[in-house]
């Protein structure tokens, strides 16, 4: 069910704390003409986020121009790993822009060479070739292409099946939505490619069987021969819930893919660059995929993405046959180099691990006394709270939406509920957030949950 925020300003409680400030009605009356312009000129599909008109953002805080400030639990949408508005990144962008090299397609540039070399140097073996793109969806499309090319090369025309997981989100383009596991997002396609199949993701809550036998049984039930599988792709953690697979499952999957000459692809678009408390999310499993897809946090701001992989796989296509108009845009490369330097120099993966442990401990306390929270997933500075009808696993999207709405009124900014029937409250602050800010924002979340539950009871 679609939910939209009202554009009619409402009085809300004043908030004045070290990190949060709400001093106007929401939405801010002066911001309504801006919101109305967006509603008039953009498609309906662009609506749905809290009606907060951003003016600027710094570190882990977002500001409007009317005196309000929020602790940001969105990172844009898991983009600003190194923090909002970092001077080092802004300076790098300005310096590159002032050089007057703003674009150069696939013609060589020094800054692109510096970025791919940097990425190759910090990636584990064998992920030593790097292809720069623009968005995460593009990287998934590229991974599909490489999986099928490799599969048909080593196993003939029948080796072209791509296995992915239910509830997964891999993007909004044709191929990326076919490997995605959300049926409602694929209804527009009409003629789904039978070479894409989805199996249950072993999260332990929505899918209780977390054994690797479940993977093999699912393939049998779908009539998929293992020697026809070209690749298996999964989000390192599921973006809609923040759920990870069991370590033993992933190690068995790595062995299975190697044994059947299928490529294992980890979609790290949300997980990479320190988000989960390790530089790469797949490190939690003790494995390395054959291909990895990156985006979002790679630059902490501008549109850039990358596929990294085994050289023999990345070099399957001949010169000039795998390109993109804005591949390795110089200004975006400058931002990425500066952002990666900050992630490494400031050990933001370590901060995500340390502060994230405190975050998850506090969230676990809330979950333990709130039967309307069915599961808590995530690692580091990503978490998902799945709202349910008590005593069931039935998603309660209305409760999740109300919790997010009330949190925004209290000065904690999140994007609208995701996954699990739109019933997951997603928490993903910039990796520079402090323990003090986590303490304050979790307290606000707890208040929002309590108020939302009281309001829900009153309606019932």
Image (spheres, helix red, strand yellow):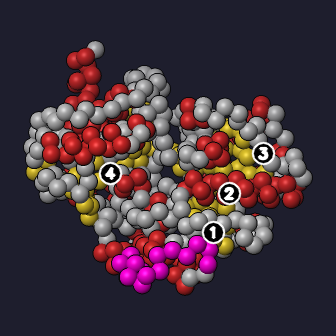
Instruction: Report the residue marked by disc 1.
Output: 131
Q: Can you name the residue that lies furthest to the right here?
A: 156
**105 and 233: which is toward the camera:** 105
**Cα–Cα span, label 4 and label 1:** 30 Å
Q: Secondary structure at mark 1?
A: strand
Contact flag, marks 4 and 1 (Cβ < 8 Å) = no
The spot of residue 399 in percent (x, y) is 33, 29
**Which numbered mark, 2 or 4, is in the foreground of this view?**
2
Residue 174 image position (x, y, % from top left): 63, 44
Distance of mark 1 from mark 3, alpha carbons? 23 Å
Q: Quadrant of the C terminus?
A: top left
Task: Tell me, for residue 143, which label it has, or none.
Answer: 2
Name which quarter of the figure residue 357 lies in.
bottom left
Where does label 3 land, which residue? 161
- What's the distance in space between the residues labelled 2 and 3, CA to CA? 13 Å
Q: Does the CB distance between marks 4 and 3 fall below 8 Å?
A: no
User: Image point 28% across, 48% down: which residue?
Assistant: 413
In the picture, residue 284 is in which quadrant?
bottom right
Q: Residues within 10 Å of mark 3 (few under 14, many from 20)?
A: many
**Along the horizontal axis of the image, is 5 left or right of 160?**
left
Q: Is residue 320 visible?
A: yes
Residue 101 in the magenta stretch? The answer is yes
How crowded pointer 4 is (Cα within 10 Å; few <14, some 14-19, many 20+) is rated as many
Give whichever of 405, 46 is nearer the camera.
46
For label 4, the residue is 73
Q: Is residue 285 above or below residue 442?
A: below
- First of labels 4, 3 by sequence position: 4
Q: Residues within 10 Å of mark 2 (few under 14, many from 20)?
A: many
SS type, badge 2? helix
Question: Residue 124, relative to residue 136: is it above or below?
Answer: below
Please report the residue visible at 60 percent of the width from the left and 31 percent of the height from the top: 187
């Amino acid at each position: 069910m679609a939910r939209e925020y009202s554009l009619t300003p409402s009085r809300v409680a004043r908030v004045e704390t070290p990190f949060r400030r709400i001093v106007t009605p929401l939405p801010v009356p002066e911001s309504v003409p801006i919101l109305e312009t967006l509603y008039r000129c953009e498609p309906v599909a662009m609506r749905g986020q809290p009606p907060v008109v951003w003016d600027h953002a710094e570190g882990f805080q977002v500001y409007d121009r009317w005196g309000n400030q929020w602790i940001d639990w969105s990172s844009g949408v898991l983009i600003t790993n190194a923090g909002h508005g970092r001077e080092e990144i802004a300076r790098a962008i300005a310096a590159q822009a002032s050089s007057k090299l703003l674009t150069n397609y696939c013609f060589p540039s020094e800054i692109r060479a510096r970025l791919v070399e940097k990425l190759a140097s910090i990636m584990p073996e064998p992920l030593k070739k790097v292809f720069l793109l623009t968005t995460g969806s593009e990287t998934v499309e590229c991974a599909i292409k490489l999986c099928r090319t490799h599969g048909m090369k080593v196993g003939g025309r029948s080796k072209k099946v791509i296995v992915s997981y239910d509830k997964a989100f891999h993007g909004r383009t044709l191929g990326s939505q076919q490997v995605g596991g959300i049926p409602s997002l694929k209804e527009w396609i009409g003629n789904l490619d039978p070479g894409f199949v989805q199996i249950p993701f072993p999260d332990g809550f929505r899918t209780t069987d977390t054994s690797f036998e479940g993977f093999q049984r699912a393939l049998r039930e779908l009539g998929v021969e293992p020697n026809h599988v070209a690749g298996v792709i999964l989000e390192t953690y599921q973006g809609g819930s923040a759920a990870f697979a069991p370590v033993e499952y992933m190690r068995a999957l790595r062995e299975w893919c190697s044994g059947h000459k299928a490529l294992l692809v980890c979609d790290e678009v949300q997980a990479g660059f320190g988000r989960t408390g390790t530089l790469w999310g797949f490190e939690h499993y003790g494995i390395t995929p054959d291909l990895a897809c990156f985006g979002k946090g790679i630059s902490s701001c501008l549109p850039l993405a990358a596929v990294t992989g085994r050289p023999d796989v990345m070099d399957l296509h001949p010169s000039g046959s795998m390109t993109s108009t804005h591949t390795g845009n110089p200004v975006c490369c400058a931002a990425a180099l500066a952002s990666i330097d900050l992630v490494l120099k400031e050990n933001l993966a370590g901060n995500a691990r340390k502060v994230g442990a405190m975050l998850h401990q506090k969230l676990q306390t809330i979950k333990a006394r709130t039967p309307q929270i069915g599961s808590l997933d995530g690692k580091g500075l990503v978490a998902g709270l799945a709202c349910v009808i008590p005593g069931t696993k039935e998603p309660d999207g209305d409760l999740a939406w109300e919790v997010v709405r009330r949190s925004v009124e209290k000065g904690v900014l999140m994007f609208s509920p995701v996954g699990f029937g739109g019933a997951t409250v997603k928490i993903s602050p910039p990796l520079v957030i402090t323990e003090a800010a986590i303490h304050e924002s979790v307290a606000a979340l707890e208040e929002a949950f309590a108020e939302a539950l009281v309001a829900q009871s009153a309606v019932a």
